[in-house]
Image (spheres, grey):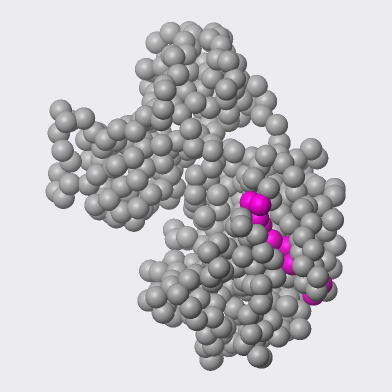
C-alpha cells in the first residue's frame, strides 16, 4: 500500500472542482439530471485517516423509512472501473494517488421504477455534488449508480456517497483517495489517438463499438484510426453487442428496446433497423457467418445459455448446443462448418469447437483458468480469446490445428473482446485501465499497440466493418 500523505490543495484547485472539474454521472436516468455544485467552507482539503475496510451501510435506524413498499440496499461498495458487462473492476476502500474515477455500486432489492432519487457526494464532510435522477434500473440486482471523477486524479481525502429515495436516506458508504494526485499511466505505452466527434468520410475498414459517452449504452462507429466517430443508435434503452456483417454494410446487435434482450439488424449508418428474434427470453451476442446469410447468437430460451442459429431473413431456427451448462461467445469459422465457443462443461470456461455437420464437439484449448470470448481469424488458422491463465484477463491466440497458445497482451489492465480486422493483420480489443474502458488496436502478433478512443466514459465491444 502506498504511504498516504496529507497535502493542501490550492484555492484554484477548489475553484476548478466547484466549476465542474470534479464530475459525476448516472446511468441511465429517465430525465436529465439536475446538478448542484457546492462551495467549500475552507480553502484546504484535509484527508481523513483511511478506513480499515470498505464502508457499507444502509440507512440508519433513525432515518424515516421511504414510503410504500420497503426497498433495501444490502451493500455499498466502490470500484475504479466497470467492465463491458457492468462488473466492478478493482473494488477497494482505499484508492491510490492519481485515481481519476471511482464508481459507486449498490446491491439492492424492492426498488420500484420511477422513484425520485438523489446521489450526493461529499469530500471530507463538504458536499461537492448532488445529482437528481429517476430510478430506472431493475427492481432488484447489483449495479453502479454514479461515479465521481476528475481528469489528472481526484484530490486526496475521505469521500462519502449517499443515495436518497423520495427524500429519505436509503444507503451510504465511503472510501479514501490517498496521497498527492498525479497523472495515471495508460495501460499501454503508445500515445492515445483521440477520436473526433465530427463525422468523417470512412477510409477503409471501420470499427463499431459500444459507448456510454451519451449516458446510455449506444452503438457507435469510427474509422480504424479512431477518427470520425458517429453515433448509430439513439434511444433510452440498452444497445450493445455490435457485430458487423462480412461486407460491412450491416450491423447485428442486441437491444432491450422492446422490453427484453433481442437481436436486431441495422444498416451501417444506423438506418433500417429490423428485429431478427422475438422471444420472451434473452437473446444476445450475435455473430455473422462469413457468407453473411446466418447469425449465431446466445439465448436462454430453453432454460440456460445455448448457441442458436437463425437465417438473416428471420426464417428457421437451429439449436447448436444442448446441455445443462452455459455455452456462450460464438464465432464462425471462415468455411461456415464450425463454431468456436466458450463452455464450462468441464468445470471452468474453456474453448470448444462445434462441428455443424457432424455435431461433434472438441476442446480447442485446455486450462484450469477461464478462457472466453473467442474470435476466429479470417484465414481460419487461429482463434483469439481472453484468458486469466497468467493472473489477469489478457488477449491470447491459439492455433486451430496444433493448439499452441501465444500471449499477445501483457500488462496490469484487463484486456478483453478481441476482434480481427478483415485482412487478419490487426486485432482490436478493449482495455480497462481501472478508470474506464477504451478501444485499442494491435498487430496480430501483439506488437504496435495503439489507443483509438480516449473518452471519459466506457468504450467496449469492438467489431470491424469492411467496406
Check the picture and name the quadrant holding the N terminus.
top right
Residue 194: give x, y in percent of width and height: 73, 43
Residue in the foreground of this view, choosing between 396 and 96: 396
Q: Relative to residue 209, is residue 335 drawn left or right?
A: right
First to last magenta residue range: 380-389
Which residue is located at x 46 percent, y 29 percent? 93
Please identify the quarter of the rendering in which residue 210 is found.
bottom right
Coordinates of residue 84 in the picture (x, y in percent): 55, 53
Q: Quadrant of the C terminus?
A: bottom right
Q: Is residue 408 visible?
A: yes
- Residue 257 higher or lower than 64, as above or below: below
Displayed quadrant of residue 34: top left
Q: Is residue 136 left or right of residue 411?
A: left
Q: Residue at horizontal 30%, vertical 33%?
A: 57
Would residue 263 be visible to someone looking at this image?
no
* Residue occupying image coordinates x 58% and y 15%: 3
Q: Is residue 267 magenta-colored?
A: no
Main structural element of the magenta stretch: helix, strand or loop?
strand
Q: Residue at horizontal 71%, vertical 54%?
A: 395
Whole-percent x and y of residue 312? Answer: 60, 84
Q: Is residue 420 above or below residue 229?
A: below
**Circle count:** 0
The picture places residue 177, in percent across and down from the top left corner, at 51, 23
Query: 145 or 91: which is nearer to us?
Result: 91
Amino acid at each position: 500500500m502506498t504511504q498516504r500523505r496529507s497535502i493542501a490543495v490550492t484555492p484554484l484547485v477548489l475553484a476548478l472542482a466547484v466549476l465542474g472539474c470534479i464530475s459525476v454521472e448516472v446511468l441511465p436516468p429517465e430525465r436529465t439530471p439536475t446538478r448542484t455544485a457546492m462551495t467549500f467552507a475552507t480553502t484546504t482539503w484535509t484527508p481523513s485517516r483511511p478506513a480499515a475496510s470498505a464502508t457499507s451501510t444502509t440507512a440508519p435506524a433513525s432515518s424515516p423509512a421511504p414510503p410504500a413498499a420497503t426497498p433495501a440496499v444490502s451493500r455499498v461498495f466502490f470500484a475504479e472501473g466497470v467492465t463491458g458487462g457492468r462488473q466492478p473492476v478493482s473494488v477497494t476502500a482505499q484508492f491510490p494517488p492519481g485515481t481519476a474515477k471511482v464508481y459507486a455500486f449498490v446491491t439492492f432489492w424492492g426498488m420500484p421504477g420511477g422513484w425520485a432519487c438523489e446521489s450526493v457526494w461529499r469530500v471530507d464532510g463538504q458536499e461537492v455534488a448532488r445529482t437528481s435522477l429517476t430510478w430506472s434500473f431493475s427492481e432488484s440486482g447489483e449495479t453502479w449508480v454514479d461515479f465521481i471523477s476528475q481528469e489528472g486524479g481526484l484530490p486526496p481525502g475521505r469521500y462519502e456517497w449517499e443515495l436518497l429515495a423520495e427524500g429519505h436516506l436509503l444507503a451510504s458508504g465511503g472510501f479514501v483517495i490517498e496521497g498527492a494526485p498525479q497523472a495515471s499511466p495508460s495501460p499501454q505505452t503508445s500515445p492515445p489517438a483521440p477520436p473526433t466527434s465530427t463525422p468523417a468520410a470512412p477510409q477503409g475498414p471501420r470499427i463499431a463499438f459500444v459507448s456510454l459517452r451519451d449516458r446510455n449504452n449506444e452503438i457507435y462507429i469510427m474509422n480504424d484510426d479512431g477518427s470520425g466517430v458517429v453515433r448509430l443508435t439513439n434511444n433510452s434503452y440498452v444497445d450493445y453487442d455490435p457485430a458487423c456483417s462480412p461486407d460491412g454494410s450491416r450491423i447485428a446487435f442486441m437491444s432491450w428496446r422492446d422490453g427484453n434482450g433481442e437481436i436486431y439488424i441495422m444498416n451501417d449508418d444506423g438506418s433500417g433497423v429490423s428485429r431478427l428474434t422475438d422471444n420472451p427470453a434473452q437473446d444476445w451476442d450475435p455473430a455473422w457467418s462469413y457468407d453473411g446469410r446466418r447469425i449465431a447468437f446466445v439465448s436462454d430460451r430453453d432454460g440456460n445459455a445455448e448457441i442458436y442459429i437463425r437465417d438473416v431473413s428471420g426464417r428457421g431456427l437451429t439449436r447448436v448446443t444442448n446441455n445443462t451448462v452455459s455455452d456462450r461467445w460464438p464465432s464462425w469459422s471462415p468455411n461456415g462448418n464450425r463454431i468456436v465457443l466458450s463452455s464450462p462443461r468441464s468445470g471452468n470456461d474453456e474453448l470448444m469447437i462445434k462441428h455443424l455437420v457432424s455435431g461433434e464437439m472438441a476442446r480447442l484449448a485446455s486450462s484450469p483458468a477461464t478462457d472466453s470470448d473467442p474470435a476466429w481469424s479470417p484465414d481460419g488458422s487461429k482463434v483469439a480469446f481472453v484468458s486469466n491463465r497468467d493472473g489477469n484477463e489478457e488477449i491470447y491466440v491459439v492455433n486451430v490445428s496444433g493448439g499452441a497458445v501465444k500471449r499477445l497482451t501483457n500488462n496490469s489492465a484487463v484486456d478483453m473482446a478481441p476482434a480481427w480486422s478483415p485482412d487478419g493483420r490487426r486485432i482490436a480489443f478493449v482495455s480497462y485501465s481501472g478508470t474506464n474502458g477504451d478501444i485499442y488496436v494491435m498487430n496480430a502478433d501483439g506488437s504496435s499497440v495503439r489507443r483509438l478512443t480516449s473518452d471519459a466514459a466506457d468504450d467496449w465491444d469492438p467489431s470491424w466493418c469492411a467496406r
